[in-house]
């Protein structure tokens, strides 16, 4: 495995960890508030409300904002997406989207 491929796998692992952290914070928010934050409030409400112990909403490893979608696909209540290295929806390999709804 080349260094570039290992670096990419590390970035994907970090995105997956971030998405799971966002998921836990969103579920806690929903439990306490009776609903999810609307899309226009974004993930920053999780920090403002103390649901994420961060100063700012983290960006993905490629320095792009995570995308919070309410409602999510396939009748899911929400989804969170990193658009990969190119920051554009769609793509393959290093540009492939990484979605909470597709993490096992």
Image: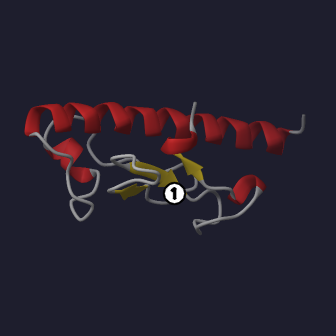
Tell me the quarter of the image containing the C terminus.
top right
Looking at the image, which is closer to me, 84 or 69?
69
Q: Residue furthest left?
A: 33
Q: Residue furthest front?
A: 75
**Spot occupied by residue 56 in the image (x, y as percentages of width and height):** 29, 48
| Residue displayed at 38% across by 32% down | 21
- Element carrying mark 1: loop
Tell me the quarter of the image containing the N terminus.
top right
| Residue displayed at 23% across by 65% down | 40
On screen, 22 above or below 44? above
Q: Is residue 34 left or right of residue 86?
A: left
| Residue displayed at 49% across by 42% down | 100
Q: State how the image is colored.
A: secondary structure
Looking at the image, which is closer to me, 50 or 26?
26
**Spot occupied by residue 10 in the image (x, y as percentages of width and height):** 67, 35
On screen, 9 above or below 90? above
Q: State the residue position of label 1.
A: 63
**Spot occupied by residue 102 in the image (x, y as percentages of width and height):** 57, 42
Count neighbours of disc 1 (C-alpha within 10 A) and say few if under 14, some if 14 to 19, many if 20 or more. few
Q: Is residue 34 left or right of residue 93?
A: left
Image-quadrant location for residue 30: top left
**Spot occupied by residue 16 in the image (x, y as percentages of width and height):** 54, 36
Q: Is residue 26 visible?
A: yes
Q: Is residue 93 left or right of residue 46?
A: right
């Amino acid at each position: 495995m080349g260094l570039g491929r290992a670096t990419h796998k590390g970035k994907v692992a970090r995105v997956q960890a971030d998405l799971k952290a966002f998921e836990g914070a969103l579920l806690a928010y929903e439990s306490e508030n009776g609903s999810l934050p609307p899309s226009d409030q974004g993930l920053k409400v999780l920090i403002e409300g103390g649901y994420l112990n961060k100063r700012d909403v983290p960006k993905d490893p490629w320095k792009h904002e995570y995308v919070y979608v309410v409602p999510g696909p396939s009748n899911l209540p929400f989804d969170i997406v990193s658009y990969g290295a190119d920051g554009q929806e769609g793509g393959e390999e290093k540009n492939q989207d990484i979605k909470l709804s597709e993490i096992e």
